[in-house]
Image (cartoon, rainbow, N blue to C red):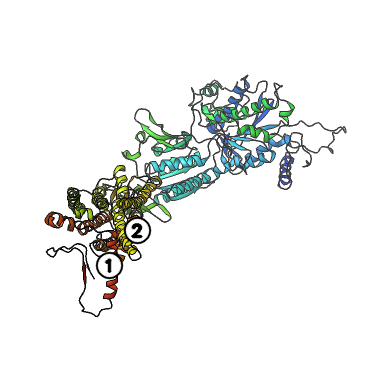
Amino acid sequence: CFCASQRSSGSPPLKPGLTFRVLWILQAFLDLAGSQEIYAPHSIRVEGDVTLGGLFPVHARGVPGMPCGDIKKENGIHRLEAMMYALDQINGDEELLPNVTLGARILDTCSRDTYALEQSLTFVQALIQKDTSDVRCTNGEPPVFVKPEKVVGVIGASASSVSIMVANILRLFQIPQISYASTAPELSDDRRYDFFSRVVPPDSFQAQAMVDIVKAMGWNYVSTVASEGSYGEKGVDAFMQLSREAGGICIAQSLKIPHDHKPSDFDKIIRLLLDTRYARAVILFASDEDIRGILNASKRAEQVGHFMWIGSDSWGAKNSPIHQLEDAAIGAVTILPKRATINGFDAYFMSRTLENNRRNVWFAEYWEENFNCKLMSSSKKDESSRKCTGQERIGIDSKYEQEGKVQFVIDAVYAMAHALHNMQRDLCPENSGICPEMDLAGGKKLLKYIRSVSFNGSAGTSVTFNRNGDAPGRYDLFQYQWNNFTGPGYRVIGQWTETLQLNIEDMQWPRGEQDIPSSVCSLPCKTGERKKVVKGMPCCWHCEPCDGYQYQFDEFSCKLCSYNMRPNANRTVCQPIPIIKLEWHSPWAVIPVFLAMLGIIATIFVMATFIRYNDTPIVRASGRELSYVLLTGIFLCYIITFLMIAKPDVGVCSFRRIFLGLGMCISYAALLTKTNRIYRIFEQGKKSVTAPRLISPTSQLAITSSLISVQLLGVFIWFVVDPPNTIIDYDEQKTFNPDLARGVLKCDITDLQIICSLGYSILLMVTCTVYAIKTRGVPENFNEAKPIGFTMYTTCIVWLAFIPIFFGTAQSAEKLYIQTTTLTISMNLSASVALGMLYMPKVYVIIFHPELNVQKRKRSFKAVVTAATMSSRLSHKASDRPNGEAKTELCENVDPNSKFPLFCYQI
């Protein structure tokens, strides 16, 4: 027995517990051998400074009771010889591992995981030291044991189930392993298989490629068939998982081929597949033998051409699975990791003979099988076979085609060699061979170098590993096709390198079908309809139309168009929403424009009249300076109508901001100054005969300008904070029917900003109204107090009607038209009221009664104040009289023939 506490100097520390039990199991295996040869009777040993292990399926699985079966010419011998070829190339390369010779210990797995585990115990022998303290030779001397060679790394295995079994034992002794064919996804688990790497991509990549192929074909209803075991079951699991993630692919049947199968098992699988006849596409993750069984069963069921086979890399571009079953394989799509034929290996292998290849202990058996002959020393019992001459030649006397994984075997050996080379360079900088530091480095350090290698492989493609030890996914896609000139054969139809590139026009279908055969559960939806997938059945769906502002994004979903778009008639794409603005010919614009034009004409007429009769008493008595200011404001109130209807641009929007509240501000600033002046004059008259301050024309203009400057300052701040711009409002007329939707081109002015711009003018208007109320008792000939009052009362009514209309239509589809028309008409009416009540009577007198527009006796401010005081006192006395008593008139300088006495007061 051997002790767990004693180890060779180069072995890594072992953990207690599970490791201890594993060592006892290993001891039991070794003790069974007793005094027999510790090495397997059938293995290849190549001497070298550094020894690599090799695991290859030289033989097929044996019948019950026998570990091994028939020799595997391609998967076994070709791959084994590829490793031997790579070793020869590396040992002959003076730049790679100079002065270091690579040796090998190659074992046969017999395509069985348990047998492979037993064989791989050979690799860990050197890491275990037996306790020989009690062992003595017959002469009493201690024995000398031949120490097994130390295996630093293992190339293999082929089948994923074998690699998994072997990886579990190799990781305990920290021996790195590089596989050339194992693609099971679970081997990507770096926590469980931390010393495992591979130069082929995992099945999760080829499963993704299969999903992409299925989707590219338009198939959504497929079945899966897997060989029992890690490779087949894990591959199908990966395909099903990825198909669920991709969506739209339903698994009709998921079937498994048992290990110990019979022909009836394959017939049953075909019957089950036919239960879902519309699922013609079948995903195959199966071994060569199982693929042959499936194709044979389809022929027996007379279903050749019905199924569309999609084979994994176990099928690839090999002839062995379809030998004499070519008609059943026509149309099959297969996947194979991207590879190239290694011409150097072809020359090497075809030159192998019984004489020059004695190092391969299985080559004689291969020779008999390949040339269908019998050697003199053969144990072959077939007496009908001819005798081998030894002069036969591979590729001449037998058919030869390089096996698909040869490239990856070579790349795996070179990856190990590059890792050893880099380790030697770092650990032995001054030594040309193996130094003690490298000899004691251990497998963990070598693994680090393996994971970091990067070189161009035998096919010219880069060989690298990710953090899980996986190679990047690069696949060639083949289809088995019939050619009238050359017969059936594989044809490259595309490739997959993270994305699919498939040349569908190069594909061929069985039964003479011209179009891609269907493998669907439901018919495609019409244009503008989406597929509503049946729960649990992503291949089956109901068709639902896209509605509202949705368009058909893909076959499974409708998406809303962006805010400025609407779907086209068949809802396949979005198109821009038409842009509108308030047009001049619109009824909503015609009315305010007509009123504004009348108002402008009237204002110009009044202004021209006042200018013409500027020095007449009526014009002078009305306060010429403020009258012109007021007329300017009225004119601007009319002008804003045209700016509100004009096509919005930056210039128009700028003028809108300026003139929106400016006209009203100028008008009501002038009126407020007037009413304030009247109020102060007559309030002052009640107290004294001295004139109040700031009642001169210059002072009045200064006050008015100050009030107007507040509005201009606000507009200036508005310009700075929010520069004028145009926007397109798509929400205003976004109707339920997208065909009626419109975008409204307008200035970037909100309803709140409009009210704020008018707010100051409204404040002036309200203040002016208050003064008008306070001066309502002032005689009408004193600076138009009563006309101003009537003007303000009417204006307030207009704007009180404006506010509910303006805000009440904020959500209306006609908001643009209603609000613009309401605002412009309100401003037109306000201007017209002021123009009509304050200026039209004067213009009437000036034009039609010029005899009244004459100079009267001027009175001093004292006389005016005296009259106002008497009026005030008499009004108080009048309130004490009984009702019906006659009123008293106080008039100065009355012309008895005049109908328009000046300075006449009714008390």
Q: Is residue 795 above or below residue 566?
A: below
Q: Is residue 360 above or below residue 637?
A: above
Q: Is residue 513 above or below residue 520?
A: above
Residue flagged by tag 2: what amino acid is it? Pro
Q: Nearer the viewer, residue 648 or 160?
A: 648
Kindly identify which numbered label has been placed on residue 692.
2
Q: Which residue is mark 1?
A: 777
Q: In the image, residue 713 lies at what x, y percent?
A: 38, 48
Q: Is residue 420 above or below residue 714?
A: above
The disc, 1 or 2, on the residue closer to the chain's N-terminal end is 2
Mark 2 secondary-structure assignment:
loop
Mark 2 surroundings: few (<14), some (14-19) or many (≥20) residues within 10 A: some
Q: Quadrant of residue 491?
A: top left
- Left-right relation of 883 to 529: left
Residue 315 visible in image: yes
Residue flagged by tag 1: what amino acid is it? Gly
Quarter containing the N terminus: top right
Q: Total marks drawn? A: 2
